[in-house]
Amino acid sequence: MSGGVFGAFLAVLGREWKLALRHPADTLAAVLFFVLVAALFPFGVGPAPETLSRLAPGALLAAALLAALLPLDRLFGAEAEDGSLDQLLLSGLPRSALAAAKALGHWLTTGVPLIAATPIAAAMLNLPVEAWGVAMAALALATALLSLLGTLGAALTLGARRGGVLLPLLVLPLAIPAVIFGAAAIEAASAGLSAAPFLLLLGAGVSIAAPLAPLAAGAALGGD
Amino acid sequence: MRSIGGGRILAAGQPILEVSELACIRGDRAIFAGLSFSVPAGGALLLTGANGAGKSSLLRILAGLLPAAEGEVLLEGTPARADPTGHALRLRYISSQDALKPALTVAENLAFYAALWGGEVTPALEALGLSALAGLPGRVLSTGQRRRLALARLALAPTRLWLLDEPSLGLDAASVTRLGALMARHRAAGGAILAATHLPLPLPDATELKL
């Protein structure tokens, strides 16, 4: 029959995936937002290639993190509205594991499509092709960090009035290190230097947040 | 089979649910206090009372979704507080909301809960007369059909305790009969039922608790 905590974790994750496939609009909205912001930059700063390439790392990171924020206030909000959250809390999954499944689900359905769209955005920002690989790696880690912090934010603001406004105010300041190290990694790669130190620092951030953010989110879900 | 429900043998006469000196405070208002009762194996308790009397809050406290201000809840002799995750697996809670995803089909909606708790989807749908609707997306269901799909979760793997919040709201007579058969089978297998309701429910020999 069911396989205990791990089986329940996979069931929740599979449901997230299936719901995202049935509602592709949420994922598409995030990806289009990301690409459109990247497309707007050249209009604002002028099409001079050097200026654009200088701005590209920071613009990519900021646009991706803002795009990944879009579906976050529905992460627990939609479940709470239709009563599914009660059933998920009674699913036999510890609350922190439920939050971890939600965070991973958010990354798979929002972060991964953003990574896939990175070359398009990078091309529009005139990022040197040599740096595209590093840009995708940096965005992978940065969006993973945002999914973890965002799940915590979504759990904390659940049921708050204006939670949708509160959530970015809560999460984005915490995501500043992701922007700094992510942009530094892309900049290093486009200058022909090693991006490894910055990616490792980002990875360290993800490894710290991976256990801690779901624990805190689980505790936040426990309160009424 | 998992040992969450059917497998366990209870000592004769041991109640499934024991509640002692339970108090609930919402906002600054005490909803109820000093509430004590127990439900034996095969027993049923009807919660009645005016709107706002705390029926739903009581069910949520018993499910472990709402902290009690005071008092203790014992399920099969185990305090609910000691192991919230295990406690959740020993009961089924049907809230006033149907908890359905409109984008998933009827069978997919139920299959998710079957994956969590065990049990078979097809007989559970059959028990509530939903077999013909299995392939339809949740969004096209009527109110009564949505309620039946929520109740079909009861027909998945057995647990000792059912907590039902207005289970028959929106159901037609045939569906109430089906629910009655499901509840009778649960009680015959030694399960207990707590139901908050304003409508008459097919629960013979149920004790009534007026909040």
Image (cartoon, helix red, strand yellow):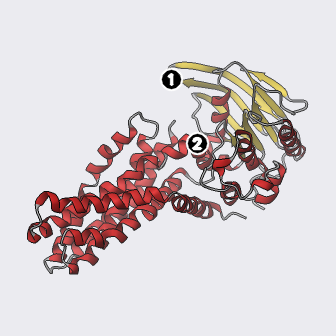
Residue B78 in view, yes or no = no
Separation of residues labelled 1 and 2 (CA atoms): 23 Å
- Pointer 2: what residue? A82
Q: Secondary structure at mark 2?
A: loop
Circle 1/circle 2 CB separation < 8 Å: no
Chain hosting mark 1: B
Residues flagged by tags 1 and 2 on a common chain: no
Rate crowding at label 2 as few (under 14), some (14 to 19) or many (20 or more) other CA atoms within 10 Å. Answer: some
**Label 1 neighbour load within 10 Å: few <14, some 14-19, many 20+:** few
**Residue type at mark 2?**
Asp
Give the letter of the chain under mark 2: A
Which residue is found at the position 54% from the left and 42% from the top? A80
| The quadrant where residue A47 appears | bottom left
Q: Percent position (x, y) of residue A38?
A: 24, 62
Q: A92 or A53, which lies in front?
A: A53
Quadrant in which the N terminus of chain A is drawn: bottom right
Q: Secondary structure at mark 1?
A: loop
Residue A128: percent from the left, percent from the top? 18, 77
* Residue at screen point 75% across, 41% down: B162
Left-right relation of B108 to A136? right
Task: Report the side of A121 relative to B114 (left or right).
Answer: left
At 84% from the left and 47% from the top, the residue drawn is B10
Dot 1 corresponds to which residue? Answer: B27
Query: How many labels, in total?
Result: 2
Q: Label 1 amino acid? A: Gly
Of residue B173 and residue B207, the one placed in the foreground of this image is: B173
Percent across and percent down for residue B72 are 65, 33
Side (left or right) of A179 relative to B55: left
